[in-house]
Image: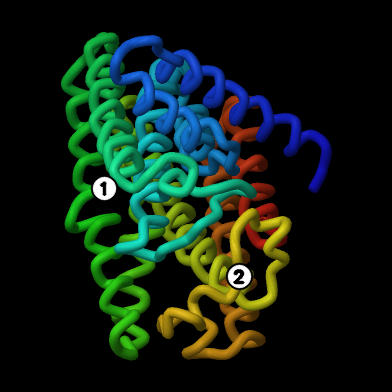
Amino acid sequence: MNKKFMEELNRKAGAVNDYLDRTVSAQENLQKVVYEAMRYSLLAGGKRIRPVLALTAAQIFGEMEINILPFACAIEMIHTYSLIHDDLPAMDDDDYRRGRYSCHKQFDEATAILAGDALLTKAFELAADGALALKDPVRGVNAIRYIAVCAGTEGMIGGQIVDLDAETRTISESELKYLCERKTGALLRVPVLVAAAISGMEGSEKAKLLLEYADTVGLAFQIKDDILDVEGDSRLLGKATGSDAKDGKTTFVTIYGLEKSKNILKALTDQAILACEKLLKLQTGEQEKEACVFLRDLAIFLLERTY
């Protein structure tokens, strides 16, 4: 990827990391172990795609980064809690995450469950604080509702329960798409919804194009994950490969095969790039235009990623 894109990606991810580090600080109280487990998973690295997308969408809407940052980090906390619970023996039973032991292996199952629960509740505390700091707190309340819906039974959790079902039977193509739209797509869609709510741009043409971009990238992201599970390098991924086949899960690769899945991934990336090009034509400010170019490069980055 080009240098300018990587510098901006690292800047935004760095802002998120700093905020998370300050928000979930180490404690020396009786419950310090749960803070240790929260920080262990939350600060373990990761691409920070969801909060970066929120910050970039806010930039396109002309909103100040400081106003969106609490909500962006709340989304990342929810994503991290979902990974902690996803790795548990009762779910995917994965021992490694981001190149080291998953939370329940580093600590224990009970602590991992509580750490995930704590991150989820901390996320809403953080978002509520962000809402109260806005000139119009109602916009923040709308953003919080979007987060709740996308993280709940009609969003991520709904997708996860279908994913568990996919381990016991062969699900259809439409069911697989339903799963992906919720388990992966919901938390890639919500950054745009939140940014639109905070900036008062809900329903705008910019918001519609950004949602099209997010939905397309969300599906592409899951297909890429399916491909990497087959041919990825576990050292780069930071976790074992082949788990989908081991668990007997229906994936895009099992339905379409590897090559067709790659073709679908490329077509979705092209669709996301087209949305960026349409979005670019609506921009007048230089920063907004740069944000559109960044999103285009982000779609390519996610297509080419090896982890």
Residue 300 is left or right of residue 133, and the answer is: right
- Measured as percent of width and height from the top left, residue 142 is found at 19, 32
Residue 112, picture quadrant: top left
**Inter-mark Cα distance, 2 to 1:** 26 Å
Q: Amino acid at mark 2?
A: Thr
SS at badge 1: helix
Please name which of the two marks, 2 or 1, marks the residue nearer to the observer: 2
The residue carrying pointer 1 sits among few (fewer than 14), some (14 to 19) or many (20 or more) residues within 10 Å by Cα, namely many
- Measured as percent of width and height from the top left, residue 151 is found at 26, 47
Of the 4 image quadrants, the one containing the C terminus is bottom right
On the image, numbered disc 2 is attached to which residue? Answer: 241
Q: How many marks?
A: 2
From the viewer's side, name the closer residue of 20 and 195: 20
Question: Which residue is located at x 47 percent, y 22 percent?
Answer: 20
Answer above or below: position of 88 versus 219.
above
- Measured as percent of width and height from the top left, residue 148 is found at 21, 41
Q: Which mark is residue 151?
A: 1
Residue 164 is left or right of residue 142, and the answer is: right
Instruction: For residue 204, say whether it is visible.
Output: no
Q: Amino acid at mark 1?
A: Ala
Answer above or below: position of 221 versus 292.
below
From the viewer's side, name the closer residue of 153 and 37: 37
From the viewer's side, name the closer residue of 108 and 240: 108
- Measured as percent of width and height from the top left, residue 270 is found at 62, 66
Question: Which residue is located at x 34 percent, y 60 percent?
Answer: 183
From the viewer's side, name the closer residue of 238 and 294: 238
Answer above or below: position of 25 versus 196.
above
Residue 279 is left or right of residue 67, and the answer is: right
